[in-house]
Image (cartoon, helix red, strand yellow):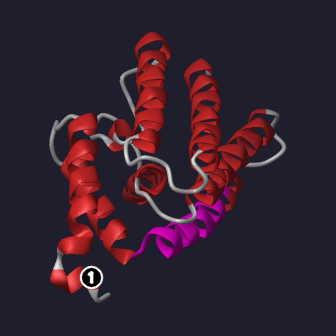
Amino acid sequence: YEEYRQHAMVFTNRCFAVFIVAIFWGGSPPVWAAPLAVALHHLMADDITRRHGSGNTAVRSVSKKLQTSTFYKRVGYLYSFYQYLAIASHIVPHERLADAGYNTIIAIASSAFMMTLYRKKIIRGRTHMIVYSFCLLLSAYHIVRMTGIWVAVLTALAFAARVNSRANKYAIWTVFRFIVAALPLLPFVAGA
C-alpha cells in the first residue's frame, strides 16, 4: 500500500509539473522541458518501487507469476497501456499540454478514491474496476484527441516494446520522442 500511495503522490505531482512547464513558457515550452520533468518524476517513482515494491510494476504486474484469469490480465494490460498514453501526452509537444497535465489526474484521483472505498469495504473490487476503467477511457479519448492518432500508434509500439522485451523504459521513451519529432517530416503524416 505504501508504494501505491507514494506513486499516486509522485504522478499527481508529475501532472502539476507538466502544467507548470506549459504555463511557464506560454504554451510553447522548449522540447526538452516536459520530458525532463516527466523523467525526473519517473526516477522518483523507480526509487519508491525499489524501496517499497514487491517486484511487480504496472507493466510487469500481468506476468505469468500471478495467478489471475485471462480477463484480468487483459484489463491489466489496458491499464498499463493507459499509463503509456498518459506519459506520451506529457512528453509530446502540443498546444494543449497544460490541459494534458491535468487530464491524467482523473486516473490517479479516481483510483485513490475507489481504493479507499474498497479498503473500507464500501465497494467491491469490480466496482473499482468499472469506475476506474471508465475514467481511463474518458482520459484516453482526450489524449488521442489532443495528440493525434500517430502518437497513439507510436505509443502502442513503445508499449509493445516494453512488455515484450526487457528494454529500458527510458531508452524506449527517448527513441519515441525522437520519432515523434520526425513525424511532421514524413509525407504520409504531414497530410493527415
**Which residue is located at x 57 percent, y 47 percent?**
25
Q: Position of residue 85 (x, y in %)?
A: 43, 57
Most extreme residue toward the top is: 51
x and y percentages locating residue 3 in the rendered image:
55, 22
Q: Position of residue 107 (x, y in %)?
A: 63, 51
Viewer-nearest residue: 140 or 151 = 151
The residue wearing badge 1 is 190
Q: Residue at x 65, y 40 (%)?
A: 16
Q: Residue pushed farthest bottom?
A: 191
Please tell me whether the stretch drawn in magenta is mainly helix, strand or loop: helix
**Displayed quadrant of residue 151:** bottom left
Q: Quadrant of residue 149?
A: bottom left
Badge 1 element: helix
Please say if 159 is above or below 63. below
**Quarter of the image where one finds residue 61:** top left
- Magenta span covers which residues? 132-148
* Up-down relation of residue 92 to residue 15 (above or below): below
Quick one: 125 or 42, which is closer to the camera? 42
